[in-house]
Amino acid sequence: MAPKDPGKLRVLYLSHGGGPLPLLGDKSHDEMVVALKRVAASIPKPSAIIVVSAHWETVTPTITHGSTPDLIYDYYGFPDESYEITYPAPGMPALADEVHWCLQQQGIASILDDDRGFDHGLFVPLKIMYPDADIPCIQISLVKGLDPAAHLHMGKALASLSRDNILVVGSGFSFHNMKAFFTPSQERTEKNDAFKHWLIKTCSDPELIESERTERLINWEHAPYARYCHPRAEHLLPLHVCYGATGRACDTVYEAEILGVDSAMFLWS
């Protein structure tokens, strides 16, 4: 598929897998790697990337503001090579400043952080999608308390960015019950399938009016087996930022088996 012409904003919610495993040749991540490469091939190369990662929560929304961020190896117990992964993508303070301004315009206080680096919610999927690490990146934190409406509001603020050809990435996982990952069962499959189908309908069904789509996302806990699939919401809420930035049904759904679990990703192109 030929990439579309560059435009103002593209948005991707992705399932980023288990720590560094996608970069270590782990077979249970093969479908994820293929899906992310397909996404990258289907859209123009971004001029900059904004990542909202499940692995960063702060009291006040915080934006990386450094020019040369280090990597944060925020995982444990993996082979030594996991801590030698490099992804020297530059930061972009000017974009961070604009995001800060956009949040302020929506009445959202935020903080610029000159010191924080990029966690694996950024460097793992982006090393697959854009291995040259030549696209400037910034990260935005989730907000402690994990309120769905607050994250939709953050996404709405990003919709007012003035720069063209920005990719917003919500880096999470459509299923994130850590205990269940290591106890495969028919129950896990059935419960995940029910929630995944609800999530796909919510994000992609053009027949849903946007007030209904918003209501479903705000009240996601009422979805089938929601709290089984997400005992905490941190891997789901990057999706809320993505939808807030777009306000419409996604264009493409990607499904991939990751760590033995069927997962979903959503692209607004």
Image: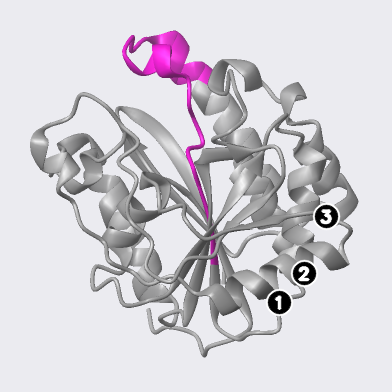
Q: Is residue 181 above or below residue 49?
A: above
Q: Quadrant of the C terminus?
A: bottom right
Q: Residues within 10 Å of mark 2 (few under 14, many from 20)?
A: many
Instruction: Pick whichever of labels 3 and 1 is earlier in the sequence.
Output: 3
Mark 2–mark 1 Cα distance, whole angstroms, equals 7 Å
The residue lying furthest to the front in this view is 115
- Residues at discs 2 and 1 in contact (Cβ within 8 Å): yes
Asked whether 101 falls inside the magenta stretch, the response is no
Identified at 73% across, 55% down, the residue is: 110
Q: Quadrant of residue 59?
A: top right
Pick whichever, 123 or 229, lies toward us.
Answer: 123
Residue interval drawn in magenta: 168-191
The residue lying furthest to the left in this view is 80
Identified at 80% across, 37% down, the residue is: 218
Pick whichever, 109 or 154, lies toward us.
Answer: 109
The residue lying furthest to the bottom in this view is 5
Mark 2–mark 3 Cα distance, whole angstroms, equals 9 Å
Disc 2 target residue: 102
Q: Amino acid at mark 2?
A: Cys
Q: Is residue 186 above or below residue 73?
A: above
Instruction: Pick whichever of labels 2 and 3 is earlier in the sequence.
Output: 2
Mark 3–mark 1 Cα distance, whole angstroms, equals 15 Å
Q: Amino acid at mark 1?
A: Leu
